[in-house]
Amino acid sequence: MGRTDRASLLVHVDAADVFAALTNRDDLLAWLPPKGMRGRFERFDMREGGSYRLVPTYDDAPAGGGKTSADSDVSEVRIPRLVPGELVVWEVDFESDDPAFRGTMRMEWTLRSGEHGTDVEVVARDVPDGIRARDHAEGLTSSLANLSAHLEP
């Protein structure tokens, strides 16, 4: 482990709206699953020190299957830090029998207010070796595009 992936996008709404979309159960389900997936929470406690369990499911399962099952990528997520309007930090562990997907990935969602909206940057640290860089870049970019489409008029 040790790879860091990042993506960013200017979203044309204020930081408070972006922060709400990063911390609200229904909003997260609407935009977080990347293209070709849908998600559901088995547990949701969004607060500093809280956690959630997310079950994203592929619309069309990949040939090699998902990280957890033939069509899903279950993750346990802890929330060590929340700074309203500025920062959301997740510590993500995937449920997988494959050791290439084990380990804790730290995802930092940083919000920077600007004249035309909010720059949203996601930095994923200690990305498990089983997540290919290209696939992760596509997933992060897709989620940011979904966030923008969810929030912008």
Image (cartoon, grey):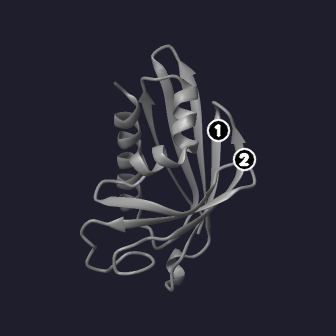
**Which badge, 1 or 2, is on the more N-terminal residue?**
2
Q: What is the number of the mark on residue 87?
A: 1
Quarter of the image for residue 83 reads top right
The residues bearing labels 1 and 2 have C-alpha atoms spaced at a distance of 8 Å
Q: Which one is in front, 150 or 80?
A: 150
Is 58 above or below relative to 35?
A: below
**Residue in the picture at 53% in, 49% down:** 25
Q: Position of residue 19 (x, y in %)?
A: 57, 35
Proximity of marks 1 and 2: CB atoms separated by less than 8 Å: yes
**Residue in the picture at 38% in, 36% down:** 150
Quarter of the image for residue 34 reads bottom left
Q: Secondary structure at mark 2?
A: strand
Give the position of the N terminus as an image quadrant: bottom right
Q: Residues within 10 Å of mark 2 (few under 14, many from 20)?
A: some
Q: Amino acid at mark 1?
A: Leu
Q: Which residue is mark 2?
A: 81
Residue lying farthest to the right in this orientation? 49
* Count of number-bearing discs: 2
Q: Residues within 10 Å of mark 1 (few under 14, many from 20)?
A: some
Q: Position of residue 28 (x, y in %)?
A: 48, 48
Is 83 above or below relative to 117?
A: below
Q: Secondary structure at mark 1?
A: strand
